Amino acid sequence: MLKRFHQRTRAARCRAIVVATQGGKIKFADANANAWLKQFFGLQAGHRSLPRKVRRWLKEQSVLNSPLVARHGGARLCLKRQPTYAARTVSLLLEIITGAGQESSRRHHALTPRENEVLAWLARGKSNGEIAAILGIKSATVGKHLERIYPKLGVENRTAAASFAAEQGRTED
């Protein structure tokens, strides 16, 4: 039980959240988000607007739903737009991916053809239900595929898996 708590706590430190207006004015950013925006985009402490690159990416999100990935040294920062119920508000999930161990585990575990299909649709922003309908399988089966995909890629969630797929060009047929 304690081990699971520590794993969740460690994973939480790899994620952050930003809430902004559609114009890019930051309404809320947790401590990790502020630090990462500064590290990956040069955003100054106390700056209350999203970096220009992030604002441009958000404008494109009305057309496609792929994550934005920024690199700094050996680390990557993945930004993914999240659903929000507040009008004229943008919610972003930020996830940092570091470490050579993750990269080597990604290279050594091949995905099955079906897992590649699921991953490609995931990278296009589809939900489990949408992926299931597209592939003619049950939503629970999509969930099982994702459970097998995450450890093979060395990631913990959909955002990181979608980021990896986008970087590898797995979003195309």
Image (tube, rainbow, N blue to C red):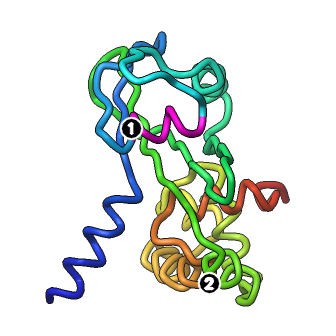
> How many circles with numbers are drawn on the protein?
2
| Amino acid on which the number 1 mark rests in the picture | Pro
User: Do the numbered discs 1 and 2 sit on residues whose CB atoms are within 8 Å?
Assistant: no
Q: Is residue 134 above or below residue 45?
A: below
Instruction: Please state the horizontal and vertical placement of residue 92, each as a whole percent of the image.
Output: 43, 37
**Which image quadrant is residue 69 in?**
top right
**Residue 164 highlighted magenta (yes or no):** no
Quadrant in which the N terminus appears: bottom left
Instruction: Please state the horizontal and vertical placement of residue 152, each as a whole percent of the image.
Output: 62, 84
What is the crowding at mark 1: few (fewer than 14 residues within 10 Å), some, or many (at least 20)? few
At horizontal 42% and vertical 44% (from top left) the residue drawn is 93
Q: Is residue 128 above or below residue 57?
A: below
At horizontal 57% and vertical 49% (from top left) the residue drawn is 77
Extent of the magenta region: 33-40
Quadrant in which the C terminus appears: bottom right
Read off the residue under disc 2: 152
In front of the other: 170 or 113? 170
Q: Is residue 11 left or right of residue 107?
A: left
Q: Gap between marks 1 and 2, in whole Å?
A: 27 Å
Instruction: Please state the horizontal and vertical placement of residue 10, each as a whole percent of the image.
Output: 32, 69
Q: Is residue 74 left or right of residue 141?
A: right
